[in-house]
Structure formats: C-alpha cells, structure tokens
Amino acid sequence: MFLKPIALGAAAALALAGAAVAQTRLSLSEVLPDGNFMAENAKSFAEAVREATDGEVVINVATSGSLGFKGPDQLGAVRDGLVDMADINISQQVGMNPLFGAEGVPFLVESMEELKEYHAFLRPEFEKLAEQYNQKILYMVPSPAQYVYLKTQVDDIGDFRGITVRGADKNTVDIVSSLGMDGIAMPWGELLPALASGRVSGVATSATSGVDGKFWEFLSHIYPTNHTWGSNAVTINLESWSRLTPEQQAAIEKVAAELEPQFWESSRESDGKSLEIMTGHGMQLVELSDELKAQIAEKAKQVQAEFFDRVPAAKPIADAYLASKGGN
C-alpha cells in the first residue's frame, strides 16, 4: 500500500528529469535596453519559439549588454560560442569584414520599401558571411530612419563644421565627416557618458535610440537626414543550431519567417512614436532646406565612391539593385 505512492513519485521524478534533459536553453545577447523595439522583438521571438517547440527550446534574452558584450563584439561572440545567439548591428561588424557595411552606403536607399528591395540582393551575401563566421541568420530587421541630433540650429552646410558627432559605424562617420563634422565611431554603451562629459556634442542615429538615450537631456535639435540605413540580425551559432532536432530547427525558421514582417512594421511605427516622445520633451524637429539637402547629396557622392573603392565586392550588389529599379 505504501509502495504505490513511492513508485508513482519515482516515476514523476524520472519524467521531470527526462523533460529537463529534453529542454535546450540558449542565451541571446542583446546590447539594447528593455523597451527598445529591437529588444522587444527578440523577446517576442523567444516566446514564440518556446510555444512553437512546446517548451523544448528556451531562449534567454539578456538585454542592455548584461552579458558583457558591446555592439561590435556580438558577431565574434557568437562565432566563438561565447553566447549561443545575438542581436547584431550588422554595420558595426565591418572590422570583421567590410562587406557588412554594404547596407549603409550613404543615400543609396531612400526608404524602407527600397531597403526591402535592396535586401533581395544583399541578404544572400550576408547569409554567406554569417556562415563564414560560424553562425546562421534567423531574421533581419532594419533600424528606423536616421537623424542627426545637435545642440544648435543648422541652416547652411557650413554650420556643421567642427561639431563632434558620434556614429555607430564607419559609413555614418564618413558621411558626417564629409559635411564638416568631426565624426567619431563609438559603441552605444560609451555614448551617454560621452554626451554628459561633452566629449561629443551630437549623435547620428535613429529616433528609437534617441528615446533610449533620453537625448533631450543633452541635445535640442533633430534633423531628418536619413543618411544611411542599417539592420540588426539575430543569429545563432552553428554548433548550437546543430544541437537542435530537425523538427525544432524547422519550427524556429517558421517562427522567424512569420515574425520578420511584423518586426519591420514595428520599426516603422517606433520611428513616429519616438519622435513624438522627443518633441514632447522639448526637442525641435527641423526639416532640412532643399538647398541643404542638395549640398548633402553632393557630398554623399564622394563618400559612395570611396566606399566602393574600399569594398569592391559591394559594387556588383548595389549595381544589381539599382538596375532592378531602373537606376544607374
């Protein structure tokens, strides 16, 4: 009579142990803070994967760089297996391979719709690069439109001269430098102390990042330059991927394919919401004059040419995209 509960308890314990063995836990490094739409995308993806695999695959999303990696470290961290997965700012990986900067050629792409067309040619190349660095791209999501944030009113291209402006990647630094600013590449984790100390007095980034950094505490003017485009890619280490069953892999790929269009839309929506928040805190959204836009576009031509000279592998990709839309 007493043996039956014991036997049942032992069976339950064995079942729990079996469940624990069957569960695969993956770490995902995210440098962006909670509340940023990219971080929220990653958490939504993790939850959808858990549901699609009946709890067999659990992705733990560590936000705000809490695993100790900065933006430019993410690709290498996944490559070396220091983390199973990461949400990677692609343009920040140009130190690994300059072709990672091909998405952000200044003024090559003018809208999110055009970016999607460009991705038809560019993404296969990024997927090949990811495999070279021992990882697989699961989904890609663009950052919203880009802005330059300053402390001063700018009416003429000469007004940019000498302002120290932080960019997240080389393409951004090159374009702001071409306008006369002192561009400096800097990871997100170093930006706010640099703004507080006066080391930098301007930032080139998206509206969502402007909210993350509470730029209204440091800066006053927002200029919609839309100078470059860039995306984040959530990737997984190939050894971590191979530990999953074919059924789990298929479920994860299906989740990624279904959620990616929603994530693109969340990027678009977060741009408008973020601008409302910043202007609500007193920042001024200043439209560029047609003359200033023309001056910036002219400067961008040289930056484009220099990029393709430096990264010739990017030229056929950009040319194929331009040809598809009747450009040259």
Image (cartoon, rainbow, N blue to C red):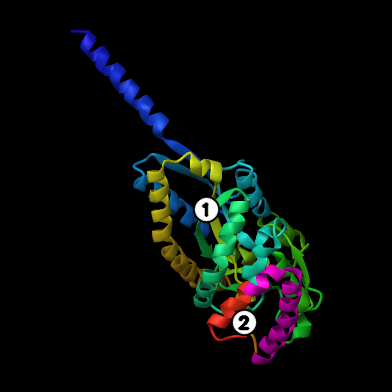
Secondary structure found at label 1: loop
Q: Which residue is mark 1?
A: 34
Instruction: Name the disc covering residue 286, or none.
Output: 2
User: Observer-nearest residue: 184 or 150?
Assistant: 184
Q: Position of residue 11 (x, y in %)?
A: 29, 20
User: Split into 4 quadrants, where in the image is the N terminus?
Assistant: top left
Q: Secondary structure at mark 2?
A: loop
Residue 281, quarter of picture: bottom right
Instruction: Say if the magenta span includes residue 187.
Output: no
Q: Earlier in the sequence, mark 2 or mark 1?
A: 1
Residue 204 visible: no
Q: Residue at x 55, y 63 (%)?
A: 124
Q: Residues within 10 Å of mark 2 (few under 14, many from 20)?
A: few
Which quadrant would residue 175 be assigned to in this image?
A: bottom right
Is 178 situated left or right of 63 in this image?
right
Callout 2 amino acid: Val
Q: What is the magenta range?
A: 290-316
Q: Amino acid at mark 1?
A: Asp
Residue 217 percent location from the top left of the image: 65, 64
* Residue at point 66%, 66% (across, down): 101
